[in-house]
Image (spheres, rainbow, N blue to C red):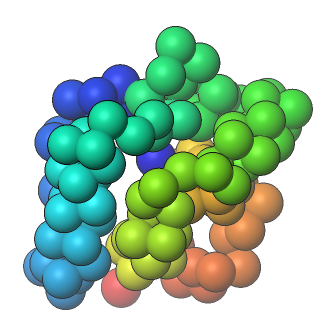
Amino acid sequence: MSGRSDDHHAIRPTADHPALWSSLQRALTQAAEDRQEIPCQSDDARLWSSRRREDREAACWRCRTCPVLEPCRAWVIGVREVSGVWGGLDTHRHQHLHPNAGRAP
């Protein structure tokens, strides 16, 4: 996941994945209520969308302790995101998770 605290509200689910979206939103809300740190919403948020492999590796490393790791990972796989680090996965390096990403239907 990338961006600051309000960025997750700008992301919209595909029509096929409302349950994944709801799960991620519930996890984010619960983490905020529990005052848990969401690494991608820190001062180093740029790491999650960087073009530099080293930055993305640092973001993946920081995701390990994220309280929303699992629903975030389910989201990125479900919606076939191809940009940035989500759920501890560098989508640049894991495009095999999304074999049809970027192709016309």
User: Left or right: where does residue 64 sit relative to residue 11?
Assistant: right
Count up the numbered dots: 0
Q: Residue at x 54, y 51 (%)?
A: 66
Across and down, in percent, residue 20 comes to 27, 77
Q: Residue at x 77, y 29 (%)?
A: 55
Q: Is residue 87 visible?
A: yes
On screen, 32 above or below 60? above
Q: Residue at x 68, y 55 (%)?
A: 64
Frontmost residue, 32 versus 23:
32
Can you say which quadrant of the picture contains the C terminus? bottom left
Frontmost residue, 102 versus 55:
55
Across and down, in percent, residue 69 comes to 51, 62
Using the rendered view, name the quadrant where residue 97 is placed: bottom right
Q: Is residue 13 visible?
A: no
Across and down, in percent, residue 5 comes to 29, 28
Question: Residue placed farthest to the right in the image?
Answer: 54
